[in-house]
Amino acid sequence: MNIPRTSNPRIVIIGGGFAGIALARKLSKQEVQVVLLDRNNYHNFQPLLYQVSTGGLEPDSIAYPIRKILKNFPNFYFRLADVESIDSENNDLKTNIGTLSFDYLVVASGSKTNYFGNSEIEKHSMAMKTIPQSLDLRSLILENFEDALLTSDLNERNALMNFVIVGGGPTGVELAGALAEIKKGILPKDYPDLDTRMAQINLVQSSDCLLKGMSVEASEKAEEFLEKLGVIVWKNLRITNYDGTTATTNSELSFRTETLVWAAGVQGAIIKGLDDEAFVTRGNRILVNEYNQINGFENIFAIGDIACMVSDEFPAGFPMMAQPAIQQGQQLGDNMLRLLEDKPMKPFKYKDKGSMATIGRNKAVVDMKNFKFQGVFAWYVWMFVHLFFLIGFRNRMVVFVNWVYNYIRFDREARLIIRPYKKKLKENK
Amino acid sequence: MNIPRTSNPRIVIIGGGFAGIALARKLSKQEVQVVLLDRNNYHNFQPLLYQVSTGGLEPDSIAYPIRKILKNFPNFYFRLADVESIDSENNDLKTNIGTLSFDYLVVASGSKTNYFGNSEIEKHSMAMKTIPQSLDLRSLILENFEDALLTSDLNERNALMNFVIVGGGPTGVELAGALAEIKKGILPKDYPDLDTRMAQINLVQSSDCLLKGMSVEASEKAEEFLEKLGVIVWKNLRITNYDGTTATTNSELSFRTETLVWAAGVQGAIIKGLDDEAFVTRGNRILVNEYNQINGFENIFAIGDIACMVSDEFPAGFPMMAQPAIQQGQQLGDNMLRLLEDKPMKPFKYKDKGSMATIGRNKAVVDMKNFKFQGVFAWYVWMFVHLFFLIGFRNRMVVFVNWVYNYIRFDREARLIIRPYKKKLKENK
């Protein structure tokens, strides 16, 4: 890779997600050379992907060019690259565009969907972790409605209008709520010749409560909101397989559906070279100490979803969400500067700023440390917080315009099939 | 196709572009059944595609769901379909989703890129007639800059940063201007380690003036504006071939480039069954009379780009632009209602509202019947007119926000490689 070596130490960051960007920002004005690698040229605001899938937002408004985030910082290099392996002994790494040596390495490669080894589900289900995936889901949902108009086979029409969302975490809950609003507000107007009642939104959760990790109040209220919107919530039910048409479960129940969205689990996006048992712990995350250092290394770190830092309060590591990622990125930035000045690093302390999920119009749940609330006010708080954490003034404005419009008009205008998904499926066969 | 026959006459419209939508709107509240067929589920505002390609706008803000345009109209059916052939004798047509009979048929299938039979150019060049094409071009431009960073071969870097735009019409002029602004305002900040001077924007025009069809003042001023922005304008030069790396011309000159955009010609998007010599005239357009009727038929019409209506002022048919399409759509709507009431139809009269093109920030040219002007004011007029003709309040707001932002910040934030283009190329090989 064409990057000059200077007298400054080189810090390589893998991944431009919340953690990587927070770290890069901290380091950008320092006497270090920062090289950020990502397979996309943009930072992707994952919490709003479900709105892209459901036509409420354009993808461009929740993505932000990484080069722009750090354009005014000298000593900063970005490369569009897929990291293939890390050689921790020799301090270099291999990518699809060449090798790169480092003095310090920070793995912030995030997480990916966990299918728990079920390749059938992996092959046939839709995921919603990236922008292209979210756009594919948007296309598929709309293509299904178009196809439902064409068939006179009731079973087939049923399968086309039946949505199964697996996983009752924030992603599943938010997607189910948004789909229910489409069913209620948009389907009848856009498809007057379809019987809207056939559109069923099923949310399947393997345990006995939604939004695991949030309070009982939030969980119960979310379920109540979803049911008010017409979502069918299945608890204590596990999807065992999906062949593209029928989803089987651990009970006698099965679903006939053309659209199964898998939001039932994530795992660390491990990179070869750090995939050893010595490093990897449950959920394919890399075990780190309280300084985010990887076991056995002074100069190799992991932050964000990929990092598993065990604490008394979180014996399985922090939740794989934006907040721990941002905080770890920021703190590691400070710690690396201390390290370079031979000062002692400070252990990471997680400040739990609470968590939240939105179910639909005027319906959200918010858990803060000493204050839990649900409903309209929670919904406003949810919107405000998400606008605040979006990067870029233009993105905030565009998202804001869309939300105001959608709110006033009960609408979601971006119901566009820009790249048909079924056609792609056929071509790949 | 699953569409009930009622006592109302069925009017089938092929194409949801400017012409088809204008017509459908006129017919929507009448005692007719309207079936609109399009291969996309959205109306695409083509005049702004170049801003999608250059990261100034998101695609979702210039596309509008066709179902939404006509959602409150009874008797209106939309089907996502590719029309394969028309049987004008039996009054029905074949599509990829089944056959459909009609009482009246209106062909508004628009235009497509004309490669004048050169399959090499067709294979290797980029077009900008559809949203996916525009997004592919956006990806390619950005991927080229990323790749330019990686190579130490100067010739290759040159080819990656050398852009050749073929065709000096509005599309070519607007794209060249936007690329020149990226070179000036964004490249140096985003890619401080690239020598920006290597990015050359070449605009190649086969005749001796740009913006053919506009006034001499407009043409000359456009050229002056482009040259001020650093675009290299080649007149009286024709690209004769392009193999993906080198573009040859009718002179000794050749260009080494990884990106050749073909905006040098359009042709009617003819449909089988009407592709007979009896109907088709130059540019693959269908000859129509002053009522937009196709030769030999009472009940089959063509409007917009596909229709060639010869008049004294326009012996080769009206220009293939939005205005004639909209006006023909509206007028045909009125005429069809007259026809149904056994009243005589009125011949089409084109009201030339003028034409315009924008070159860049504060730089546009406008020709109105008795008033031609160029520069800042023209630029405001251009923006106002384009906002006005965009369909949908949300789209207008989002485009407006983007334009204000881009103007104030000298920026184009949507420089996102969402679906890499080169990867797709490789996969298709």
Image (tube, coloured by chain):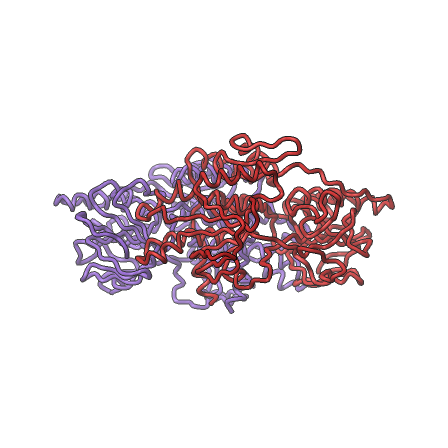
Chain colours: A purple, B red
Task: From this view, report whether residue B427 is shown above or below residue A403.
Answer: below
Q: Is residue B41 visible?
A: yes
* Percent coordinates x, y for residue A91 in the rendering: 20, 59
Which image quarter is the N terminus of chain A in?
bottom left
| A85, A301: nearer the viewer | A85
- Residue closest to the eye, A24 or B409: B409
Q: Quadrant of residue A97?
A: bottom left
Q: How many numbered circles does the render carry?
A: 0
Q: Is residue B24 left or right of residue A367?
A: right
Residue A61 position within the rendered picture, expressed as x and y whole percent measured from the top left: 46, 44
Outermost residue toward the left in this view: A342
Residue extending farthest bottom: A429
Measured as percent of width and height from the top left, residue A108 is found at 30, 52
> For the point 72% across and 58% down, which residue is it?
B280
B322 in relation to A298, above or below = above
Is residue B148 or residue B34 the one in the foreground?
Answer: B148
Asked whether residue A362 appears in the rendered view, the answer is no
Question: For residue B326, what is the image quadrant?
Answer: top right
Farthest residue, direction front: B252
Residue B89 in picture, x, y percent from top left: 80, 62
Query: Would residue A152 appear left or right of B147 to someone viewing this image?
Result: right
Q: On the picture, is A207 further left or further right than B6?
A: left
Q: Relative to residue A45, is residue A39 depicted above or below?
A: below
